[in-house]
Amino acid sequence: MQCIDTPLPLPYIVVDYNGKILQYNSLSSNLFNLDTLDISGIIYDESMNKLVKASLSNESTQQIEVNVHTKESSLVLFDVYLSDDSNGRMHILFVSKEKSNQLYLDKIIELQERLAHTDFELLEQKEKLEDVLMRLNKLSGPFIPLSKKMCYIPLFGDITSEKINLISEHVLHSVFNGEYQNILIDLTAVGEVQDDGINKLIDLIRTLRFMAGSKIQLIGIQPRLAKVLSTYELESIVEFKSSLQYILQNEYA
């Protein structure tokens, strides 16, 4: 069993198909008691059947809800995201469903329900693109599905760790529950950038790329922010574009 240095901002464990823990990150070590060396040591007995059944599915990525033993509590509800690889290993990402997180999710879901009344098919009509962009500019950082395959995440204001932590929770849920092949993250309206905030943003980008395998495009990078991002060597996992309008007109026209 090996502790790995991974940028994932959530507890992460890799097991073989017998349930033996092969790798884990520091967040998992802090949260769970891994002395048992087996995934059954942290998953509640009744939830193990659900986990085993999901691992036998032919789907490449799955989400299930399980009860988990943590160091602080004998029973905590988690969303678990599963994906397997060509080496016969199962990658498991844990997302807590504590009430503090759920309260924020409920607010974002309410916002999404309002947005659902907007017909985003209008994006195909270029003469109405400006009006749609104005609507998006009024938002503070939500997850917006533009189509079944493409989603848009505009960020506004200062980049802080608190803000990115809140955004990450819902973005991860939404991406893993959909079939998004193209994730657009718009940084045009970003203000001040804090070191811990940009680190959290980079963690989110790498997590989306690692778990979902989606195409990620960063939009509207200003020179000051470009200098900060250049130290993270993101070229292998993201593409940089000038604006949402450019993408829609040149790649999806």
Image (cartoon, rainbow, N blue to C red):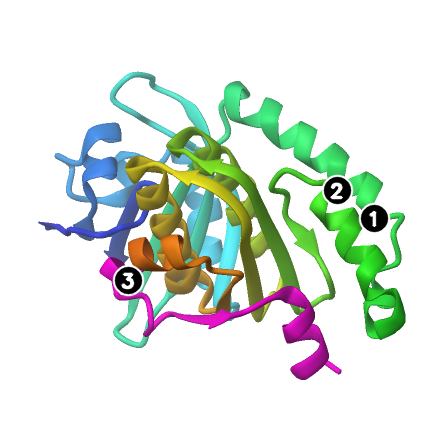
In depth, the one of 174 and 88 nearer the eye is: 174
Q: Earlier in the sequence, mark 1 or mark 3?
A: 1
Single out the mark in the foreground, 1 or 3: 3
Q: Residue at x 65, y 74 (%)?
A: 246
Label 3 sits on residue: 230
Q: Which residue is mark 1?
A: 116
The disc at residue 112 is 2
> Depth-wise, is mark 2 or mark 3 nearer the camera?
3
- The kind of residue tagged 2 is Gln
The residue under label 3 is which amino acid type? Ser
Which numbered dot is residue 14?
none
- Magenta span covers which residues? 230-253
Relative to 176, is 25 above or below? above
Q: Earlier in the sequence, mark 2 or mark 3?
A: 2
In this picture, residue 38 sits left or right of residue 223? left
Alpha carbon distance from label 1 to label 3? 36 Å
Asked if one can make out residue 65 in the rendered structure from this viewpoint, the answer is: yes
Query: Furthest residue to the front?
Result: 223
Rendered position, 197 above or below 219: above
Q: Secondary structure at mark 1?
A: loop
